[in-house]
Structures are given as structure tokens and as C-alpha cells.
Image: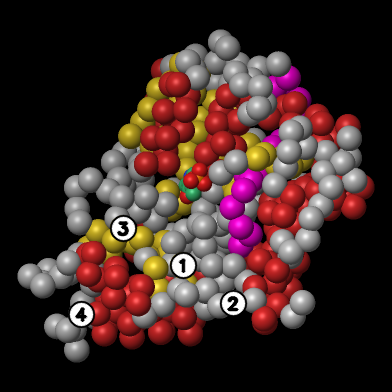
Amino acid sequence: MNMNDLPDNPYLLLTPGPLSTTKTVKGAMLRDWCTWDSDYNNLVQEIRARLVKLATKHVPEYTAVLMQGSGTFSVEAVIGSAVPREGKLLVLANGAYGSRIAQIAQVLGIATVIQDSGETSLPSLDKLEEMLARDQAVTHVAVVHCETTTGILNPIADIGEIVKKHDKVFIVDAMSSFGGMEMDISALNIDFLISSANKCLQGVPGFGLIIARTRELLKCGRRARSLSLDLYDQWETMEKHGGKWRYTSPTHVVRAFYQALLELEEEGGIPARSQRYRENQRCLAEGMAELGFQVLLDPSIQSPIITSFYFPDHPDFRFTVFYQTLKEQGFVIYPGKISHADTFRIGNIGDVHLEDIKRLLLAVKNSCYWVR
Ligand SMILES: *Cc1c(COP(=O)(O)O)cnc(C)c1O
């Protein structure tokens, strides 16, 4: 089948996952796979190897695990499998996804301490130092890289240095940044990095991925508080049985993800993709500013992934109408997710290019009669 024969999507998703994928990624799902056959299992092994290479130059230190479910399932698998019974987790939170990490730990009965810096500011490094010096019981520290709630970008390099200085295990939810920003998780002192198929790697939803320092993962045997979300067991099965998952895996999604990884390579890898995203975001922020929209975050802490804008100060602005009008013109945006201000969000990741952002800006202009 020629992929161009696949129907066009009625609109572009400007949401940070699920996001717009290419027709060739969607087309890769048009075949059924056997979960125990070597064709499929070799594909899984190839994906795992590619993921580690994307994450670090220090390949032998790390390993990759794939886990069924949305990204949150993988976060829960890491928190529930990495922190031992007598351990304690410190969470740096500045948005819904940071808070979710703490919530997971609390549901699992893990001792947790939270440093919440509010939705629009970075975690305090001094306070982190102080908390780690004071509370010797803390064994693990978790933070979100790009907090998708607002688009704030947390300083994981600085945080990782402090965490390592105190010899703690460092967990990073890089769900909405991995694949879209250059990073080396070894240089960043990361022990467990979590992401998912349907964000910057531009696959479709269905599984999450964990890139773990093998030395730390090996300590996780029999620690898990859940059977199906046991990270160690999942890894051990994949290792021992050459790419086999425990329980049914999302075969079509995995095949599509492999195609997405090939397309990432064709694009020029993460450096080229991150540049495309940065240009998209810059064009978006500048174009919206010209139309009178104000960004929520200071540019110094703004990620190249998703941008929050204040509602314009005009009596005729209604978000629901704005949303619908943009959708009719072929763009789906995101409502805001913060408590203290009226905002909306526009993501610029996925199969989204500068021409799309330029078309979006025209559509925004068409949706607000007071803008000229
Ligand atoms: C998308 C996302 C998640 C996971 O959300 P799911 O809905 O479970 O896929 C977690 N953390 C961050 C920062 C995210 O952007």
C-alpha cells in the first residue's frame, strides 16, 4: 500500500503527546506480529539498543526496558521498583507531573518528601542541598525535565550534580523532552530516565521506556510493589529471552515506534530534531507576541517543547470559541493546566514544521478579530 493513500488527519495535534505522527509511522501498523517470534523479538532488541545509544555515549553502563501502558505506568514502575522498603524519595515538584510522582510514591506507601517550588519557578538548588544534608534517610531524588504543565525546563544538570554529591539515586521524568533535546544521561548523572513512545520520539501511544544505569537496575530485584509494573522482572525477561515482554505487548505500536526511530535517524538524529523544535518554538513565541499574546514563563526557563500563553486581555475572548475556531482551521491546541492564571498551551513537537507554525499563526489571527 502506498502510504500517501492513507487518509489525511483532519487536524494537526499541537499537543505534547499523543502528537502528530507521519503517515509512514501510522502505516507501519498495518501488519500483525507474533509476540514470541524472532522477527518481533529482534525488533524489540534493536529498539532497546537504539534507545541507549540515543541517551548516552556511555552505552555499556546503561540498558533499556520497555513497559506497556502510558508514560505514567513507566513512572510508577520506576518509583515502585527502584526505591527499597526502607528508602525515601525526595521529589522536586513544579507542576502536575512532579506532583504525580509524589502521588505515586504515596499510593505505594513510600516515604516521600516534596520540595514544591510552585508552577512557574525552578526548584531551589540551595534548598535541595540543605534537604539532602539534613535528611539522611533520603535515598532517591526525582524530578521532571520539561514540566509539561507549563513548559518549564528544569535544570537537571545542576540537580544531578547535587544528587550525586550526596550519593543518591537520580530519577528523571524526561517524558516530554527525550528525543527532542540533546542530552547525555551519563554526564547528567541520571540513573533512571523515563520517557514514552508518543512524545518527541514521534511514535504512537501504547508503551513507555526506561533507560537505566544497569548497576542500579540490578539492585531492584524483588523490590517492586506491583507484579505487572515490576521493572526488574520486565528487564530480566527481555534480557534472558532476547526481546520478549512479560504479558502481551503492543505489537503494532512497537513496530510503528521502530519506524519512528528510523525516521529520527533520517532527520539527522536528536541534534536535527531538537533544532527543528527550537525553531518551531521560537517562531511560535515571536509570532504570538506580534499578535499580542503574552507568554507565561520567563524565556530563560522556557522549554522548546510546549509554550503557555495568557488569555488575551480582550472582553470578547472565549477559550472554547478560540479552540473551536482553530480546530476548524486544522489545529488542535491544549487548555492550560495551572491554577493561578487563565492560560492555554501550544505544543510544537511531533511531525510539525515551521510552515505549520506559520499557518497556525495565520489561523490565530483569523480567530481574533481584534488582532490586526
Ligand atoms: C506526558 C507526560 C507524562 C505521562 O503522561 P501519560 O498521560 O501517562 O502518558 C509524564 N510526565 C510528563 C512530564 C509528561 O509530559
Q: Residue at left 80%, top 29%?
A: 236
Determine if the magenta segment contains residue 159.
Answer: no
Q: Secondary structure at mark 1?
A: strand
Quadrant assignment for the N terminus? bottom right
Circle 2 — which element? loop
User: Please, what is the three-letter code of the amino acid marked with disc 4?
Assistant: Cys
Which residue has dot 3 on it? 335
Q: From mark 4 to mark 3, how far is it between C-alphas?
A: 17 Å
Can you say whether 336 is above or below 249 in the image?
below
Circle number at residue 7: 2
Task: Kindly report the distance in space between the C-alpha atoms of the residues bearing marks 3 and 2.
Answer: 27 Å
Dividing the picture into quadrants, the one containing residue 309 is: bottom left
Check if mark 1's residue and mark 3's residue have beta carbons within 8 Å: no
Disc 1/disc 3 C-alpha distance (Å): 13 Å
Q: Residues within 10 Å of mark 3 (few under 14, many from 20)?
A: some
Residue at point 29%, 79% (across, down): 364
Sort mark 2 into few (<14), some (14-19) or many (20+) by Cα contacts within 10 Å.
Answer: few
Q: Is residue 309 above or below residue 105?
A: below
Residue 58: where, in percent of width, then height?
77, 47
What residue is shown with label 4?
368
Compared across the picture, whether 196 is left or right of 46 comes to: left
Instruction: Please identify, in this view, whether the residue under mark 2 or under mark 1 is nearer the observer.
Output: 2
The spot of residue 219 in percent (x, y) is 72, 21
Q: Is residue 147 left or right of residue 55?
A: left
Marks 2 and 4, Cα distance to the nearest angstrom? Answer: 30 Å
